[in-house]
Image: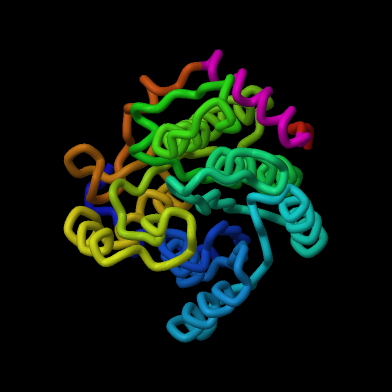
Amino acid sequence: MNNIWTKDNIPDLSGKVAVVTGANSGLGFETAAALAERRAKVILAVRNMDKGEAALNKIKSVYASADVNLMKLDLSDLNSVRTFAADFLKKHESLSILINNAGIMIPAFQLTKDGFESQFGGNHLGHFALTGLLLPRLISTPKSRVVTLSSIAAHNASINFDNLDGSKGYDRFKLYGQSKLANLLFAKELQNKFSSHHIDSMSVACHPGFSNTNLSSFGSGKRANIFIRMLASVATQPAHMGALPTLFSATSPTIKGGEYIGPDGKGGRKGYPKNDEIIERLYDSNLSSKLWRASETLTGIYYQFEK
């Protein structure tokens, strides 16, 4: 893999429809802007429509001909996920790229509208439900891709099926890691299911290393305090660099499905996209199957892979 892959390597995406969750800021914004620059039709799937409108206008101010649209999506509310998916299926006949990007990190304990622990519910279950509901468009679109963002926090995490809701003790860091490991396992398991059903769609996991995004606001949506911002400026790479693994996963012709793409620097913290082989240690088929079954039961979304 070329270790200096940048967004300039993205091929022309004319005719392709892309959905990016959490596209109003940070990695999601950088991802959506780069896809729009390469002429994809990009749907900004956002919870806050005012911030989404500002992001859309910012993209249009730089790329006047960009085909960018705004749709409301709250991944912490399964009714919102269902509404978004139903509206999308009515409006669009194809879906080439789904970027499961949105997420929150180490907030105070709270539950989603459906009673899930907020990190597991929003980061994993919301995206699990969204992907399942959009599956008809994904599998009917040749060589479509699902890119799901994980995190370095997943690399030493575990799934505690007895405490998915945090009711038996809430350690915000452990439960963040759990949610991001769930993202990784979901992406790999989805690829296995595509392959076993002889579907040419691809599922890829990726992580941005240590990137300077608004995740440092701990899910509040507010600006992080000055100490956190100063620390982030020194220890992290800018969001446009952190978005490269996502963009590589979504557009590189070398992707086959099932990979885990992250920065190539020391510890995977910074750099240009490369295949992170740690997925071979983290992926466990029994664990992933159990997570898949639990996710279907909790969300009520059961995947149908028939075309």
Foreground residue among 164 and 141:
164
Q: Is residue 205 magenta?
A: no
Q: Position of residue 10 (x, y in %)?
A: 40, 60
Q: Quadrant of residue 72?
A: bottom right
Q: Is residue 17 left or right of residue 241?
A: right
Relative to 62, is 297 above or below?
Answer: above
Specify whether residue 8 is in view: yes
Residue located at (45% from left, 61% from top): 31
Relative to 280, is 53 above or below?
Answer: below
Foreground residue among 199 and 276:
276
Q: Is residue 286 magenta?
A: yes
| The C terminus, quarter of image | top right
Q: Position of residue 6 (x, y in %)?
A: 30, 59
Specify whether residue 256 is in view: no
| The N terminus, quarter of image | top left
Q: Quadrant of residue 241?
A: bottom left
Residue located at (47% from left, 60% from top): 28
Residue located at (66% from left, 44% from top): 131
Q: Position of residue 51 (x, y in %)?
A: 55, 74
Q: Which residues are magenta?
A: 285-301
Foreground residue among 33 and 108:
108
Residue furthest top in the image: 286
Residue located at (50% from left, 36% from top): 179
Q: Main secondary structure of the magenta part?
A: helix
Q: Is residue 237 left or right of residue 169?
A: left
Q: Is residue 119 left or right of residue 234?
A: right
Relative to 290, is 1 above or below?
Answer: below
